[in-house]
């Protein structure tokens, strides 16, 4: 359940690693079978930490070598590092970090990404306020298990603090790290760099959580003196109280939390408004939130805004609103939300400013002039897997697969009638799963003329043929069907204008170069 719902906040780690829950009595030693008894062996690592004092706006460092320690590993809890019962105990060392006195709210940033720490060391760092106690909260984050697993296995992060307090950083490795990726190690030399900087808590002024079908829309406004707000964390409630969203029996407002980035639009500046969509996409655990909230009957959300350095605002309790999806020209309000690409303007859905801006930046197809023979332009581009600004109207693709950002091509046909042929069935596209649709008005889904997803069950490329079009401007949209774990995909598209000829005109019997308006070409003459 935890993996199914857990959101991920970007930048420096906020909830990018789950907080370290559990752990029991800190004086009882390791809990798993096979671990040394409490009274055996050398002292716990908390008995002899490395002392280090921070400096405001400067970096101080501590060099360690966990492979040289004789001290017993400290229990990190059941959600930090390798939690397998027999593999939880990589060697570790502890830094007791004193925050400089005389400062107020600060962020203590740390990083093991440097020239001393080998890049194959899968570093785990746990931050504590009491060295003898396992942190129980998920947020603010306390466990950092690799900055970008799969790319960067060393760790970095930040924790909020106040001047004069002492924080404890347990530095260790993901036990038996080679099982995560070949060549990784769980011990060795490591340098941990600390930087202290002033960082004020952001302020949350307004918040909305709206379920639209099974999607969730979050909108917030607030202020942040440091201008580094990035996301929100939320608790959810039904009529009986706080929901245990991970099903672990440990629901509190610090660990039964769900975190997401604000990216549509992102917060910018010191006074900002921001939001995000959490789309219901099969196979992506984070985006199943709407379905979960509907299923359990959630009615309220407790929401806080967070910044890049792990500081958080005071919380606001807001109702969870159920809303219907409405489209172009329809009435919108608290319980009627405009579909993707529209904004509620004076009570009706109109093209959103973002959609209008995207339509002003279309890629020109530069279709040559044509008279009696077809012309083709070949174009290439990239599509991505975050939800874009536009959706096809005809439903040729499931809503959950309609993603973007889209690539929009503008076709200006100077003469007509003509047939418009579009295909992505080309070598550059390969097996990438595209869909295409055509509109006469870029920002208006109601102007859609056609849409195609797959040429066949075994062919994920797309093609459209529109006949007897008049001279004018047309917009060809190329998108990518959702595929978990994929960021961008390349595509190629051929756009062809084929003239439609009148009676008596010389024509192509194969109807490749042109087509007759009144029937098949006969003996190279249109009937």
Image (cartoon, rainbow, N blue to C red):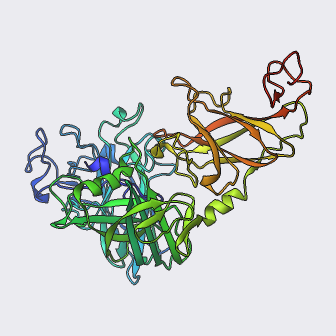
Which one is in front, 416 or 282?
A: 416
Find residue 95 and report its horizontal and vertical position in percent. 32, 60
- 438 above or below 111? above
Hey, which residue is sitting farthest top in the picture? 523
Q: Is residue 356 left or right of residue 34?
A: right
Q: Position of residue 393 (x, y in %)?
A: 56, 48
**Residue at 65% across / 36% down in the picture?**
491
Q: Residue at x 36, y 79 (%)?
A: 163
In the visual, does 133 lie left or right of 312? left
Q: Is residue 441 above or below residue 283?
A: below
Please state the horizontal and vertical placement of residue 81, each as a whole percent of the image: 29, 47
> Looking at the image, can residue 375 be seen?
no
Total marks shown come to 0
The percent coordinates of residue 291 (x first, y second) are 32, 52
Above-or-below relation of 483 to 193: above
For the point 42% across and 65% down, the residue is 218
Name, please, the residue furthest toward the bottom: 102
| Position of the C terminus by quadrant | top right
| Position of residue 416 in the picture relative to residue 393 (left or right) | right
- Which residue occupies the foreground of this view, 163 or 341? 341
Q: Is residue 25 visible?
A: yes
Left or right of residue 362, residue 13 in this image: left
Of the pair 297 and 512, the residue shown nearer to us: 512
């Amino acid at each position: 359940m935890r993996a199914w719902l857990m959101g991920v906040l970007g930048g420096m780690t906020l909830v990018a690693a789950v907080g370290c829950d559990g752990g029991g009595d800190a004086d009882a030693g390791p809990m798993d079978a096979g671990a040394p008894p409490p009274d055996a062996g050398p002292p716990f690592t908390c008995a002899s930490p490395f002392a280090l004092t921070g400096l405001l706006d400067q970096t101080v460092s501590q060099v360690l070598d966990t492979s040289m320690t004789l001290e017993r590993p400290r229990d990190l809890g059941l959600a930090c590092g390798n939690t397998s019962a027999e593999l939880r105990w990589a060697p570790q060392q502890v830094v007791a970090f004193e925050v400089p006195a005389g400062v107020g709210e600060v962020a203590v940033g740390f990083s093991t990404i440097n020239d001393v720490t080998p890049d194959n060391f899968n570093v785990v760092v746990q931050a504590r306020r009491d060295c003898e106690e396992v942190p129980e909260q998920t947020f603010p984050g306390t466990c950092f298990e690799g900055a970008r697993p799969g790319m960067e296995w060393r760790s970095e992060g930040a924790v909020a603090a106040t001047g004069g307090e002492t924080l404890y950083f347990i530095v260790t490795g993901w036990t038996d790290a080679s099982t995560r990726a070949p060549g990784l190690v769980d011990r060795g030399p490591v340098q941990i760099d600390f930087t202290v900087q002033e960082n004020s808590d952001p302020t949350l002024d307004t918040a909305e959580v709206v379920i639209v079908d099974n999607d969730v829309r979050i909108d917030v406004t607030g202020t942040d003196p440091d201008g580094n707000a990035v996301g929100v964390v939320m608790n959810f409630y039904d009529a009986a109280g706080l929901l245990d969203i991970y099903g672990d029996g440990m629901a509190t407002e610090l660990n039964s939390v769900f975190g997401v980035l604000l990216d549509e639009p992102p917060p910018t500046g010191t006074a900002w408004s921001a939001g995000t969509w959490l789309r219901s996409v099969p196979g992506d655990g984070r985006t199943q939130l709407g379905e979960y909230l509907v299923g359990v009957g959630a009615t309220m959300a407790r929401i806080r805004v967070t910044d890049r350095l792990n500081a958080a605002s005071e919380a606001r309790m807001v109702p969870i609103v159920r809303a219907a999806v409405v489209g172009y020209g329809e009435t919108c309000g608290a319980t009627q939300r405009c579909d993707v690409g529209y904004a509620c303007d004076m009570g009706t859905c109109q093209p959103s400013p973002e959609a209008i801006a995207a339509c002003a930046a279309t890629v020109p197809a530069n279709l040559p002039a044509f008279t009696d023979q077809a012309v083709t332009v070949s174009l290439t581009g990239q599509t991505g897997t975050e939800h874009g600004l536009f959706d096809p109207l005809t439903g040729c693709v499931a809503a959950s697969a309609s993603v973007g950002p889209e690539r929009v091509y503008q076709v200006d046909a100077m003469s007509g009638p003509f047939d418009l042929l579009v295909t992505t069935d080309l070598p550059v596209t390969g097996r990438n799963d595209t869909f295409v649709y055509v509109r006469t008005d870029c920002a208006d889904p109601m102007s859609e003329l056609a849409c195609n997803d797959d040429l066949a069950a075994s062919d994920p490329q797309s093609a459209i043929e529109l006949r007897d079009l008049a001279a004018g401007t047309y917009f060809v949209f190329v998108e990518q069907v959702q595929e978990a774990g994929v960021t961008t995909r390349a595509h190629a598209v051929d756009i062809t204008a084929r003239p439609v000829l009148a009676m008596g005109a010389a024509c192509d019997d194969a109807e490749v170069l042109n087509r007759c308006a009144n029937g098949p070409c006969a003996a190279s003459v249109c009937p």
